[in-house]
Image: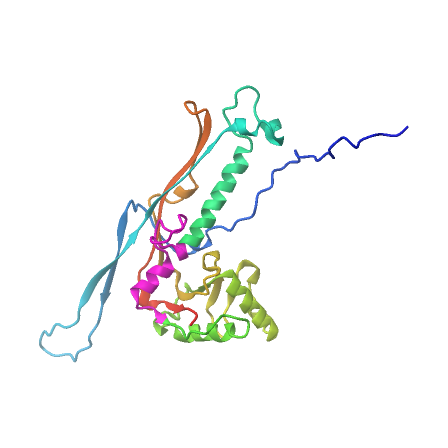
Amino acid sequence: MAYSVSSLTEYVDQQRLPLLVAATFGAKTASLVSKMTGVKSSAALNIMNTDAVFQTQACSWNASGTTTFTQRNLTVGKIAVMEELCPKTLEAYWMQSQIMAGTPDAVPFEEEFTMKKAAVIASQLETAIWQGDTTSGNDNLNKFDGYIKLIDAAGTAISATAQADITTSTVRGIMQDIYTKIPAAILDKDDLVVFCGWDVFRMYQIALATANLYHYNGEAGNGEMFIENSGVRLIAVNGLNGTDRIFAGRKSNFFVGVDLEGEEDTFEIFFAREARTVRYVCEFKYGVQVAFPDQIVSYQNS
């Protein structure tokens, strides 16, 4: 005699833990730039500029020179993330072993769920920081204008020489051109950087390696290295992925505005008795601005 199993479905162990979650990138840009807190709707970046006109000393008073005040407004988007979860939906599936006995008033894997949700919010903010556009049809991009739109709209950024495309053959020349276009007045500032997407950063790595210039790789694994023949640091940020845009400027010239710092990491998860569901909510305000667009070098393909 032998086993007869032809009428059975092959067993699949569906209750293997820990629960796996897909990788997401964080809001790296926000950790590098200037912060402005207490912004509930719009706040001005107040800018003062003055000149100094040299004169020949004399026994007289001859006033000259002008001090000018200007403003650039930082407007935040009022963002909410809400989700409703019914634990009973999971009772017919492998997750049933993780649901509390009786009438459930909590969801399984709550810690993993909230951590993943926070990571996704950070990832989407990183993209919006650069690519945000209030006229966009994408709900994750239309809550505030990002750096790209703001810099382009100002019309005073220094344009790097455009190429048809960024490739391993052109990327070194593009980076050198951007470096030569950086205003001399900010070349000695210790927060001067060049921002690019990870896709462009990788092409630059490959181009340098092909030219046997490995000594420029620096901390390439962390998305940072020096542009060849310069002391300027190139930083890869996910918010610029797929845009073929590159920007050079001081980190202190780029601002992120919020009402409360870290508010995007604060959430509530609670059992709504009237609906018999668990609800997740995260609300925060977020926006960006640049103070001196004329001190930024901007690259865009032709």
Foreground of the two, 140 or 235: 140
Q: Quadrant of the N terminus?
A: top right
Residue 273, image x and y in percent? 43, 23
Foreground of the two, 213 or 65: 213
Residue 264 drawn in magenta: no
Up/down of 40 relative to 28, above or below: above
Residue under the point 38% across and 51% down: 137
Count of labels in the image: 0
Q: Quadrant of the C terminus?
A: bottom left
Foreground of the two, 154 or 231: 154
Up/down of 101 relative to 185, above or below: above
Up/down of 83 relative to 219, above or below: above
Residue 146 drawn in magenta: yes
Residue under the point 60% across and 31% down: 95
Residue 182, image x and y in percent? 39, 72
Classify residue 275 as left or right of residue 103.
left
Going by the picture, which residue comes out furthest to the front? 7
Going by the picture, which residue comes out furthest to the top? 102
Magenta segment: 129-158
Q: How is the image coloured?
A: rainbow
When asked about the image quadrant of residue 259, the answer is top left
Residue 74, image x and y in percent? 30, 53
Up/down of 181 relative to 44, above or below: below
- Please, what is the dominant secondary structure of the magenta stretch? loop
Going by the picture, which residue comes out furthest to the left? 60
Residue 98, image x and y in percent? 59, 28
Residue under the point 24% across and 65% down: 49
